[in-house]
Image (tube, coloured by chain):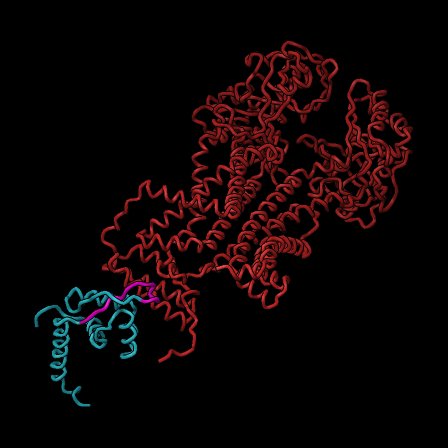
Chain colours: A red, B cyan
Amino acid sequence: MSASPHIEPDPFDAYQPPPWADALLEGFCASELLEDIQGDLHELFYKRVQRYGLNLTWLWYWLDVVRFVRPYVLKRNPDFEEARGPIMWKNYFKIAHRNLTKHVGYSVINIGGLALGIASCILILLYVQDELAFDTDHPESERIYRIVEQRIEEGQADRHLALAMGPFAPALKAEFPEVVESVRMLDRNSLGRFAIQRGASGFYEGNHLITEPSFFQVFHAPLLQGNPETALAEPNTVVLTETTVERLFGRENAMGQTVETDRWGSLQVTGVVATPPLNSHLQYSMLISLGTVTANEQISRFIEENWNGGSIISYIKLDERNDAATLATKFSDFLVQYQDEEVRAARSFYLQPIHDIHFGSQHIEQERNASKGDRTYLFIFSAIALFVVLIGCINYMNLATARAMRRAKEVGLRKVIGARQQQLIGQFLGESILVALIALVVALGLVALLLQPFNALANKAMTLSWEAHGAWLFSLVGIALIVGIISGSYPAFFLARFRPVRVLKGEVKAGGGALWLRRALVVTQFALSIGMIIATVVVLNQLDYIQNKRLGFNQEQLVVVDINSGASRNQFRTIKEEYSRLPFVEHVSASSRIPGEWKSILTTNVIRDGQEPEQATAMHYIGIDPDFLAAFEIELADGRNFSEDLALDSTGILINEAAARMMGWPNAIDQSLNILTVDAGGRERPVNFNANVIGVVKDFHYRSLHEEIGPIILGYWNNPIQRIDYYTLRISAGVPIPTALDDIEAVYSRFDPDTPMEYNFLDARLNDFYVNEQRVATLFSIAASLTILIACLGLFGLAAFTAEQRTKEIGVRKVLGASVASIVLLLSKEFVRLVLVAFLVATPVAYLLMNRWLDNFAYSAGLGLGTLLLAGGLTLIVALVTVSYQAMRAAISDPVKTLRYE
Amino acid sequence: MKGTYIGEFEELVLLVVCVLHGQAYGVAIQEEMKQQTGRSASISAIHAALNRLEKKGFVESWVGGATKERGGRRKRFFQATAAGRDALRTARQMRDQLWNLIPDLNTP
């Protein structure tokens, strides 16, 4: 009797019972029962899958397996281990090696992807380690604290200032036995900059510290020459850092020599100290002895006797008990005898551990802190490292699983010969670990190569050395192991499950099994890539917006020259005239500050008629001359500019639109207000200046675009509020800069021969506001390129594999008349769909996160649909190019050859 | 009655084993039971019951017949032993006796 011609679709090729469930069963089931229980389960699976579909049956299978957990089923003794020794390993190794070298392309892709991932991980770990190790070189650094003042302000949040009264720190050391050492310092914020000269080399120094001998007791500052006990003991002595020695003395010996300064005369070099490492918050170029400045009666009194002021940087070191909390509580009682009542009421002090300074000083102003760290960047970088490693692992998993079927015959044969499941799993896991270790070696090479550029990017000076990083070797091998295990786990389990009979009969279809997992992995990779690209585009966009935004004034072609002496300041009318005589100078203006100021802009407190002092509003202040508006090309909205006729304008001021709005004046002209006080160095200096408004200027960005435009008063330079500090020259376009500068310097030195000229180009300085963002932009660009590179590597491998799988199909299609284009389309379709899904997944998340970042800026370019589409489009194109290469190769192949292939 | 007692489910399984007459293995027993009595039992319950029956000596088993669906795994067939058949008869007798003693249930 002939069988019916009805051909049943063979279910075994499409579906398999869940491998993890089977693994579980084999894990707990006794071996003598396993065969028929599992047989029954599989039989039921195939029967049910036809009636009920895959998902339900899948679930049912799991259920059934779990229900088999009964006492009688469980293994009594663990299955005895077969002899596994080194003999088998030789074979495994040989096979692994053969596998790697036979398919070099795939191996390179695999190893390359993993190596990139591990390398990024290492670099970022180095960075994080460096950041976290700030200020750890100081001996017993956990006992060193900085004194921080918390000041209560009317109507605003408390302010934190890293300054204290002069006599405070030493008094603490004298009165409290738990304080073993104290040190105070002054820097340019208290006493300003000074000119230093030695022979032909001279410059302005602003990075100095004026401090006492106990500096060497508290901080790690090894003296290469000189005695730490005596180096800073005498007045007019200075200790230079190595870098400064090179600047001033070249190769000469500096010790014992003298340098000239404009403020304190000659200083003798009593020591040379190592330049402070980059991971210390305290950076300095030289240490000047405190005695040098206390020679001045007034300053000496301020530092040693004034308990109500407070502008000295102070640190103390505690004893082994290290009880900062208790000590801090004793402060207020201690200060009763020294401080005025009202000062004490508004101020309290606490101790900030030195390790906390780098990350924990966001809320502190007036501090000397070389590089404020931000924990969020640490998280961002760590997240990026994780991304990249993850993508590398995913690649490996995907590729290995897809190509698993090639090894099917090997697995089948091994099982027939008697290999147990565990052995096979061990073999394949071992292989992936081997690959991971190779990738580790490659990664180390990559790291050595990339360390310098990375240092430049991250503004650090990290090195790889045995002492520092020898211990890392173990963790690195550990990381490689973990990566190997993670990547290899799925393929290993998958491979080890092959049934020998089916395999050897040739019934196992290559490429089958858990297609959804591979798809999910590709989607994840591309989602991450798209996310990174969106982030990068947003950051780059914002930077571009910032750099091109109309600021309300013209920042180009402006040279700003500092005023550094009384002579320069007093003869300003003559000086202005001399400058404007230069043919390329279009305008000259003198002002106390400039828009985009890098020093602090003065804050004043003003009231208008009818208001009480308590109702004072804070406004910024810049003192200008009548040429200011023209030089900067700022527009008047209402009223008029200052005129040279001093008598008329001695009490006149200009305000900006924001100020007019704040005062509630629709028509601000001729309104008057009183400038009550001026904030100066933490104190309020009473001014009581009555002014009337003669004009309103259009709002302009006088600070970075991080901040909103606040109210600002432009006062006449002759007002007693702030002296002029800069000359700004607008020079014509097209003038060669070096000659222009020489001419300007010639004028300068005619009036101020003693001091070197300091100048800046305003547009360059404005960029400095955004250094952080520029760095983020570069970092994101790199990360985005990395992620998409690795994702494409993986896609490349997968596409190659898929194309290979379908060679017969393609051959048949070509014979039937399909064009090359249609075949390329056919092969690419699936991948394109995956990328689209990735796009849908990544976009909302990226949108939310980047909007949050943009909130940092008061003025932002926003995140539009265009950006999202750009990112998605870019990724799609890259993916298409990757896939189409393989697709093309397959499509062009000769059908005769492919169909002959058995 | 000598020997151990037989549980209700076990009895059911044993009966189906007899019905299947030499062709009884896990999946077949499950299907037959469902077909004849409408009772759906999980495969694990059936296996457990068979295990108990075998321990009590009411069935014996042998291995044979691998198929593709099972991935090449062989089946375990079960058949009632003499003791098993005895146990069934005893159980039936016992029940009949009790039934006869109940007046109401005798009437149709």
Q: Position of residue A25 (x, y in %)?
A: 32, 58
Q: Is residue B69 magenta?
A: yes
Q: Is residue A49 magenta?
A: no
Q: Position of residue A27 (x, y in %)?
A: 31, 54
Q: Quadrant of the N terminus of chain A?
A: bottom left
Could you tell me which residue is drawn at 59 percent across and 63 percent down? A826
Location of residue A140 with respect to A497 vertically, above or below: above
Q: Position of residue A751 (x, y in %)?
A: 85, 21
Give the overall secondary structure of the magenta segment.
Answer: loop
Could you tell me which residue is drawn at 62 percent across and 49 percent down? A533
**Total residue callouts:** 0
Side of A177 relative to B87 (left or right): right
Residue A283: which quarter of the image?
Answer: top right
Location of residue A482 with respect to B67 vertically, above or below: above
Side of A124 relative to A747 (left or right): left
Q: Position of residue A412 (x, y in %)?
A: 36, 55
Side of A449 relative to A478 (left or right): right
Residue A359 visible from this viewpoint? yes
Residue A160 visible from this viewpoint? no
Q: Which residues are magenta?
A: B67-79
Of residues A284 and A426, the one nearer the viewer is: A426
Location of residue A450 with respect to A890 vertically, above or below: above
Side of B14 relative to A881 (left or right): left
